[in-house]
Amino acid sequence: MNPSSEFVDLAAEVLGLLSDPTRIRIVLALREAEELPVNALAELVGKKPSGVSQHLARLRMARMVTTRQEGTSVLYRLTDEHAVALVVEAIKQAEHAVANGHIPPHHHAPRQ
């Protein structure tokens, strides 16, 4: 990738879309559960279903999430692993930003 890539502007839009804490929480919740209805997502992210629906609509327009109808429920899932990868890397960067010279949690070796 180079700075003159035709996708730089689109990448900025993707990062902008993921700059909302609720959307980050939605991505992380879908990473864990794979597929959830709006009410379950709203409970997991601590927001009202109407607000979560609006966030999901934006993520769906950006093709980061997709839906599947099951009876009267609409289930949401991540389209692919790329949104999760961006969110995880952003969280790791945030851990570095507040580490104050210490080793961030994601660098600690798992205990045996």
Image: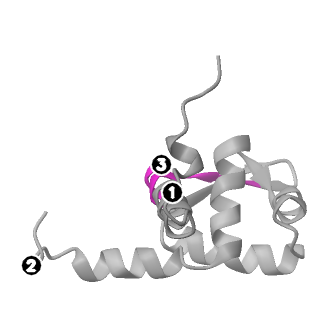
Name the spot of residue 34 as percent of width and height, x first: 68, 42
Label 3 vs 1, first from the N-terminus: 3
Q: Tag 3: residue type?
A: Asp
Secondary structure at numbered mark 3: loop
Marks 3 and 2 sit apart, C-alpha to C-alpha, by 26 Å
Does residue 18 show up magenta in the picture? no
Tell whether label 1 touches label 2 (CB within 8 Å): no
Q: Which residues are magenta?
A: 75-86
Q: Tag 2: residue type?
A: Ser
Q: Nearer the viewer, mark 3 or mark 1?
A: 1
The N terminus lies in which quarter of the figure?
bottom left
Identify the mark at residue 4; answer none if there is no mark: 2
Q: Is residue 76 left or right of residue 73?
A: left
The residue wearing badge 1 is 92
Secondary structure at numbered mark 1: helix
Marks 2 and 1 sit apart, C-alpha to C-alpha, by 27 Å
